[in-house]
Image: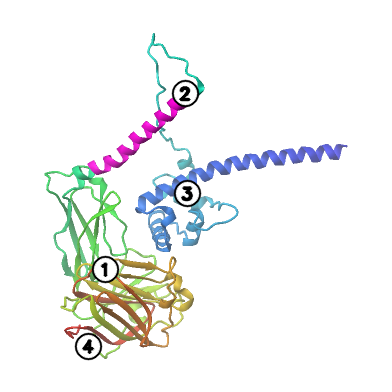
């Protein structure tokens, strides 16, 4: 009898404990969802459900830079519910503290103890002496439905008209200007907001995306803002009003022949110029050694990238050209499993870009042909999977905005786009680890002008 009573008591205590833990976890995950949403609002305009792998990589870098705590993309995906599991992921204390510190709190406990002001709605009051009829239940329902409908109609009208009015009064006529858009590498570009009005209200609603892949959007604190570009190329910075693009500018950093820079993965602060001169003959192999990269400051024991840039204006039509070259990508080494090569062809107003990975790594592939963008996480881009460690020929042919990608002279993918990119203004070829290329030819398909 005593044993039965003891077992019953233990079961009751266990049940109470489970209910208590569920209540605590429920409160915790509510706070975690709030924290995730604040982070999403801070780093960009996309909803969390729309995030791709690049967004989680970007967040991982920003967290490491600001909090000195490095969280992997997979950990962030579990926290932000990208990975669906039977039980919600409960991050450890150091992780929770890093998330809280990223949004301005001392630690997670400080975030949980924050004071939130909730809107207070006054109850309707009836003046003294006013007769209020006692409606029947049916009439009450009709009255409540009508009042609710009118309130919703008013709210929707305000939602639609208020942003339009703000844009007319604030964003209309505001343009992005770069005071010194052209230069050499490196370059401090000075951006200025231009407006028809004498003064711009709510500067904090304007932000700029620098389009160099190394910096997040930055809000204007005054009409002038400066950004440091470190890699040669042509960039297309975008001006946002709230979360909408309202203008696009350009920054153009030219080179004399081929220039080489090195970077380490997750390091958004340092770029390492690699001193190496090349002859301008088309059949010369363009490459650097690991020792040259190391001497320039690149940590070759970690994942690193080497970018070859040849940036100059041409009269080659960016909607009718052919690019072809032989290449070798890096052999397997520390930090390089997927052995990628990225190719950028810069135009006056936009770019053509694509990446090649080993067949087993095509989830990381992507391309952009003017306004046409695709990512391997969301589309079947197996055609961009190929192993070039033993060499091969890569060809990109664009004819009247119709794109063909050829590997070893065989077409593997085709697509098209609508918006012209203008004349070709340069090219970047970037390798993970040590890669090389030779016999590069870029020519206009109509005029036969060579790059």
Q: Which residue is mark 3?
A: 97
Q: In the picture, which quadrant includes the C terminus? A: bottom left
Q: CA distance from mark 3 to mark 2?
A: 51 Å
Coordinates of residue 329 in the picture (x, y in percent): 39, 82
Q: Is residue 21 left or right of residue 72?
A: right
Q: CA distance from mark 4 to mark 3?
A: 53 Å
Q: Is residue 127 above or below residue 418?
A: above
Q: Are marks 4 and 3 in contact (CB under 8 Å)?
A: no
Badge nearest the viewer, 4 or 2: 2
Label 1 SS: loop
Label 2 SS: helix
Q: Which residue is mark 2?
A: 140
On whether residue 18 falls in the magenta region, the answer is no
Coordinates of residue 139 in the picture (x, y in percent): 46, 23
Counting residues from the start of the chain, the first of labels 1 and 4 encountered is 4
Q: Quadrant of residue 382?
A: bottom left
Q: Identify which residue is drawn at 23% across, 64% down.
A: 236
Q: CA distance from mark 4 to mark 2?
A: 87 Å
Q: How many residues crowd around disc 1 within 10 Å: few (fewer than 14), some, or many (20 or more)?
A: few
Q: Is residue 48 above or below residue 451?
A: above
- Can residue 138 be spotted in the picture? yes
Counting residues from the start of the chain, the first of labels 4 and 3 encountered is 3
Q: Which residue is mark 4?
A: 279
Q: Which residues are magenta?
A: 140-165
């Amino acid at each position: 009898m005593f044993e039965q009573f003891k077992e019953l008591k233990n079961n009751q205590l266990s049940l109470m404990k489970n209910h208590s833990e569920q209540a605590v976890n429920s409160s915790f995950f509510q706070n975690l969802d709030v924290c995730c949403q604040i982070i999403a609002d801070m780093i960009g305009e996309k909803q969390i459900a729309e995030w791709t792998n690049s967004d989680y990589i970007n967040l991982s870098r920003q967290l490491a830079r600001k909090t000195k705590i490095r969280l992997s993309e997979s950990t962030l995906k579990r926290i932000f519910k990208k990975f669906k599991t039977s039980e919600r992921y409960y991050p450890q204390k150091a992780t929770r503290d890093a998330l809280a510190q990223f949004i301005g709190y001392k630690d997670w406990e400080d975030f949980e103890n924050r004071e939130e002001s909730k809107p207070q709605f006054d109850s309707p009051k009836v003046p003294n002496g006013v007769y209020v009829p006692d409606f029947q239940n049916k009439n009450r329902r009709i009255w409540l439905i009508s009042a609710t409908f009118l309130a919703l109609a008013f709210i929707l009208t305000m939602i639609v008209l208020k942003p339009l009015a703000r844009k007319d009064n604030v964003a209309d006529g505001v343009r992005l200007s770069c005071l010194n858009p052209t230069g050499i590498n490196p370059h401090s570009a000075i951006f200025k907001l231009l407006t028809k009005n004498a003064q711009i209200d709510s500067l904090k609603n304007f932000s700029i995306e620098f389009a160099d892949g190394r910096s997040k959007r930055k809000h204007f604190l005054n009409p002038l803002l400066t950004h440091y570009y470190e890699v040669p190329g042509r960039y297309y910075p975008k001006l946002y009003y709230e979360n909408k693009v309202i203008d696009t500018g350009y920054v153009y950093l030219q080179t004399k022949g081929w220039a080489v820079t090195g970077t380490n993965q997750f390091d958004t602060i340092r770029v390492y110029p690699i001193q190496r001169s090349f002859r301008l003959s088309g059949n010369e192999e363009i490459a650097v050694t690991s020792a040259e990269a190391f001497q320039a400051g690149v940590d070759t024991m970690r994942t690193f990238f080497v970018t070859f840039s040849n940036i100059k204006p041409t009269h080659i039509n960016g909607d009718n050209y052919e690019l072809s070259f032989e290449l070798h990508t890096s052999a397997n080494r520390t930090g390089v499993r997927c052995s990628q090569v990225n190719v950028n062809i810069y135009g006056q107003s936009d770019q053509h870009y694509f990446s090649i990975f080993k067949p087993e790594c095509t989830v990381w592939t992507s391309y952009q042909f003017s306004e046409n963008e695709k990512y391997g996480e969301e589309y079947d881009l197996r055609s961009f999977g190929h192993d070039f460690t033993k060499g091969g020929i890569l060809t990109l042919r664009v004819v009247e905005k119709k794109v063909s990608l050829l590997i070893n002279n065989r077409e593997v993918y085709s697509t098209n786009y609508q918006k012209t990119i203008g004349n070709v203004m340069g090219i970047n070829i970037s390798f993970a680890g040590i890669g090389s290329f030779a016999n590069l030819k870029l020519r206009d398909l109509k005029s036969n002008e060579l790059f």
